[in-house]
Amino acid sequence: MEATSYSDDDRVEAFHWWFKGRRALFGRILRQLGIAQKASVLDAGTSVGTNLRLLRDAGYTNFRGLELSERAIAICTEKGLGPIERGDICQMPFHDRTFDFVLATDVIEHIDRDDTALKEIRRVLKPGGYCLVTVPAFPSLWGHQDVQNHHKRRYRLKPLLDLIRESGLAPETWYHFNFLLFLPIWCMRQILRRFAEAPRSEIRMNTPLTNRILDWIFAIDLRMAPILKPAFGVSLLVLCRRPLDGTGAP
């Protein structure tokens, strides 16, 4: 990402509706799966540490982050979020079968070889271990924010599931989320495309009032999405698992 994007995200990640809502969603998934607080957990692509904040506050004691950007690592370190190792998700500095759970949330869209990244995630997972993948959805939503964040692509559901299966992981649950705001966001991005000078970050368009309103809408969205499994949304979520040895694992 741009260095300014790290600064913008760092300034608001503790309270912004998007970051707060995702932490609540990921935390529910961890609890529903019964992932023990002593389980080995990797946050692959920490950025400014929003998932590390979740793991710390939820009482996990054996987690670590992986991040390529020295600027992002410095931000996390300043906030007391860690430990973090510097490295590439396509060539992770961890032994095979190290982790019980891997968070790969809004990461693989930044990678040229997203297939290689997913295969690396499978490698470092223990047999039976879980990976939570989230990505931006629908190419028609492409906008200045994607360019600012150095995204390589936005995803559709079937190709993403195929990619995950080809990596040796088995998708178990999947759905779109942030579907209640899909139409407003789509319209906003179509309008912003017409302007050469767009806001540096959509996060900067937030205000205390809009944050409270969107926080409420997003909370409802994240409760409904796993049940309704809508056919559209700004983001996609896939919970996948490394098969147990002897049950199809390569």
Image: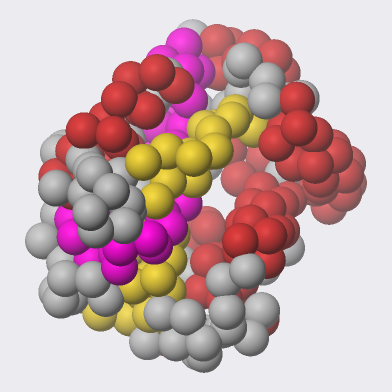
Q: What's the residue at 68%, 66% (across, down)?
A: 31
List x then y, in percent, for residue 23: 65, 60
**Residue 138 is inside the magenta segment:** yes
Say how many tags the image has. 0
**Quadrant of res 165:** top left
Q: What's the residue at 64%, 56% (across, down)?
A: 29
**Quadrant of res 98:** bottom left
| Of 120 and 66, the residue lying toward us | 120
List x then y, in percent, for residue 74: 35, 80
Q: Is residue 170 above or below residue 140?
A: below
* Residue 89 visible to the viewer: no
List x then y, in percent, for residue 173: 54, 38
Q: What's the residue at 44%, 87% (across, down)?
A: 62
Q: How is the image coloured?
A: secondary structure
* Residue 107 visible to the viewer: yes
Taking the image as shown, residue 57 lies to the left or right of residue 136, namely right
Query: In the orientation shown, which residue stands out farthest toward the front?
Result: 246
**Residue 173 is inside the magenta segment:** no
List x then y, in percent, for residue 12: 64, 61
| Of 174 and 246, the residue lying toward us | 246
| Of 58 and 29, the residue lying toward us | 29
Q: Is residue 76 above or below residue 164?
A: below
Q: Which residues are magenta?
A: 120-149
Q: Is residue 229 above or below residue 37?
A: above
Q: What's the residue at 30%, 36% (across, down)?
A: 164
Taking the image as shown, residue 249 lies to the left or right of residue 75, namely left
